[in-house]
């Protein structure tokens, strides 16, 4: 397979842009062409294919390979306690006023490899202890959900957690697991994960007191963004909080949400 044969043409890039937009509602800008080529080249080599057109035909015909392509094209960077002010607001605002007789439910709606889910679980455990609470994490990518469910991370992620939290919620690997840590079984037992496509009709989830949809809407066109937010709002309790990324905004997008802090909205 020559370098020329594996070059991603503009036409092929347009096909993959249309593919991922149709599946996940994600709009890839032209500057993502190199990223798409880099992430998919390894699959061409795996299958011994000579062109990206051949690979496009493959994912059009085989659902298993199609999911692998979705995984490769939708994986986003995340880390523990990203945009930490949000977790302080959750703790000092919504959790502080929550009636203890009702379970507190949070949905991390684009959870990637799970760091946000476990961050939320730590905050809820510190605020509500063994009380009634739960965290749901979802993503369109099956690959990152496997990582999230395992709760296993590189020690390179450890500096994002305080020493107190590392000691309380994490187990350091030894032997073959040296250089990694795993979230404690007690904390993992309080969270659940599901593969959910936010641009498709949502499965039954019940309602939530808070929904986190951070740093994903930047990849959506306005119509897709509106559709996704309106769909999620139906799962948010009245008075519930909706968290988005600091580079994102819902101003003028949907009705029924009021801004209460940077990138934080309340359902009215």
Image (cartoon, grey):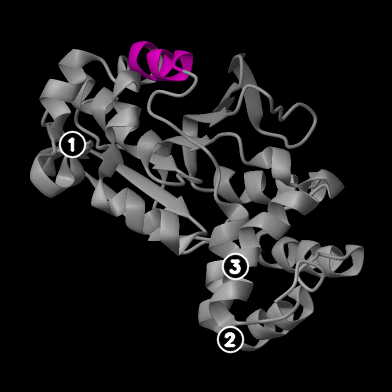
Mark 1 Cα shell of 10 Å, populated few (<14), some (14-19), many (≥20) = some
Q: Give SS at disc 1.
A: loop
The image quarter containing residue 215 is: top right
x and y percent of residue 243 in the render?
54, 29
**Relative height, residue 227 to residue 248 (above, below):** below
x and y percent of residue 3 in the render?
76, 66
Q: Which residue is mark 2?
A: 62
Dot placed on the residue nearer the N-terminal end, 2 or 3: 2
Quadrant in which the N terminus is drawn: bottom right
Nearer the observer: mark 1 or 2; the answer is: 2
Tell whether label 3 touches label 2 (CB within 8 Å).
no
| Most common secondary structure along the magenta stretch | helix
Count of numbered badges drawn on the protein: 3
Q: Which residue is mark 3?
A: 69
**Relative height, residue 225 to residue 249 (above, below):** below
- Residue at image location 65% in from the left, 50% down from the top: 228
Mark 3 Cα shell of 10 Å, populated few (<14), some (14-19), many (≥20) = many
**Highlighted range, magenta:** 84-92
x and y percent of residue 37 in the render?
72, 59
Q: Which residue is mark 1?
A: 132
Mark 2 Cα shell of 10 Å, populated few (<14), some (14-19), many (≥20) = few
Position of 188 with respect to 233 (left or right) is left
- Residue at image location 80% in from the left, 47% down from the top: 221
Q: Marks 2/3: CA distance?
A: 11 Å
């Amino acid at each position: 397979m020559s370098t020329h044969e594996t070059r991603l043409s503009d036409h092929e890039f347009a096909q993959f842009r249309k593919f991922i937009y149709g599946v996940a509602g994600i709009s890839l800008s032209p500057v993502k062409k190199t990223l798409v080529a880099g992430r998919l080249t390894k699959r061409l080599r795996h299958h011994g294919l000579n062109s990206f057109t051949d690979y496009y035909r493959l994912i059009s015909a085989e659902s298993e390979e199609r999911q692998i392509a979705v995984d490769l094209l939708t994986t986003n960077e995340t880390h523990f306690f990203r945009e930490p002010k949000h977790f302080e607001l959750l703790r000092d605002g919504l959790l502080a006023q929550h009636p203890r007789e009702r379970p507190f439910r949070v949905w991390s709606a684009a959870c990637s490899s799970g760091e946000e889910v476990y961050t939320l679980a730590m905050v809820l455990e510190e605020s509500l202890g063994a009380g009634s609470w739960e965290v749901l994490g979802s993503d369109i990518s099956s690959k990152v959900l496997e990582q999230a469910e395992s709760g296993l991370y590189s020690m390179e992620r450890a500096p994002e957690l305080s020493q107190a939290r590392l000691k309380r919620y994490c187990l350091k690997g030894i032997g073959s697991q040296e250089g990694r840590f795993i979230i404690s079984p007690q904390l993992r037992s309080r969270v659940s994960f599901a593969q959910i496509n936010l641009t498709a009709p949502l499965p039954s989830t019940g309602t939530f007191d808070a929904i986190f949809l951070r740093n994903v809407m930047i990849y959506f066109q306005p119509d897709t963004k509106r559709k996704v937010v309106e769909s999620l709002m139906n799962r948010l309790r009245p008075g519930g909080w909706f968290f988005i990324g600091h580079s994102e905004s819902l101003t003028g997008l949907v009705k029924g949400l009021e801004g209460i802090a940077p990138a934080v909205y309340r359902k009215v």
